[in-house]
Amino acid sequence: MAPTTYLSNHAVRQAIDQLRPNHPGRNSAILGIWNSILSTQFPTWQGYLVSPREHGWYNERDLWYDMQVQHLRGGPTNNQNSNSNIFLVVICRTAAEHHNINEGLPQWTTHLELYLDSIFGRRRQPGRPVRVYGVIAHGLGATFFSYDIGEHMPMLIFREHEMDEKPAYHLVEDHEMIQEFLDNIRVRH
């Protein structure tokens, strides 16, 4: 019996099936697909919050993200015991103008690493690295990263990408692997 994945969600599957490569609304459709996948994987009733990012604001390096996932723990926000940590950042690129969906991936990888370092580097305590995850979703492909900020190590692509010789996993063809990645991120964050 195959494991249940995000493709068992009829709306996600239908949205993927209806994607058209050069349609003007493709960016919104891909954002919607990822928002649905992340909202199902990280439900609000368990304290998760999936937040879209408005692209009108940029920091000093013009760094931004499309979605982030945070886990709210503890009591009310005015309680000193409450805790909120952002642990996953997603950047969506349609790559519609490229024939190869992996074109431009090195630039987006650098962008993601700079963003994670600029945001999370300020929040970590000395001697206590912070592990965060990133996804670069390009078209129907997705590349997964982990980054231990404070370890003076670069952001790392998930080792499965290299073992499988895949720079990106396909949302449909590789749904079981992507679901496994999301499950592992949920457990390890």
Image: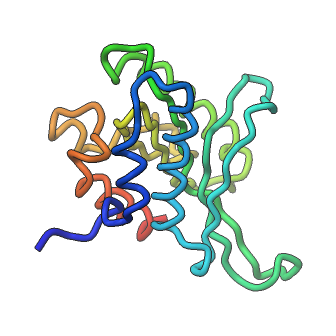
Q: How many marks?
A: 0
Q: Nearer the viewer, residue 67 or 59?
A: 67
Q: Camera-side residue: 133 or 19?
A: 19
Figure coloring:
rainbow
Residue 134 percent location from the top left of the image: 49, 44
Q: Is residue 63 left or right of residue 105?
A: right
Residue 110, horizontal then vertical, whole percent: 51, 25
Q: Nearer the viewer, residue 69 or 13?
A: 13
Residue toward you, 11 or 69: 11
Would you place residue 6 above or below residue 123 in this image?
A: below
Toward the right, the furthest residue is 78
Which residue corresponds to the image point at 72% horizontal and 52% vertical from the top-left?
Answer: 123
Name the outermost residue toward the left.
1
Residue at point 35%, 54% (across, down): 13
Residue drawn 69% across the image and 36% down it: 118
Percent across and percent down for residue 43 are 55, 72
Which quadrant: the N terminus?
A: bottom left
Image check: 91 left or right of 186?
Answer: right
Quadrant housing residue 62? top right
Q: Quadrant of residue 165?
A: top left
Is residue 178 shown above or below 163? below
In the picture, measured across the screen, residue 175 lies left or right of residue 150, that is left
Measured as percent of width and height from the top left, residue 145 is found at 41, 43
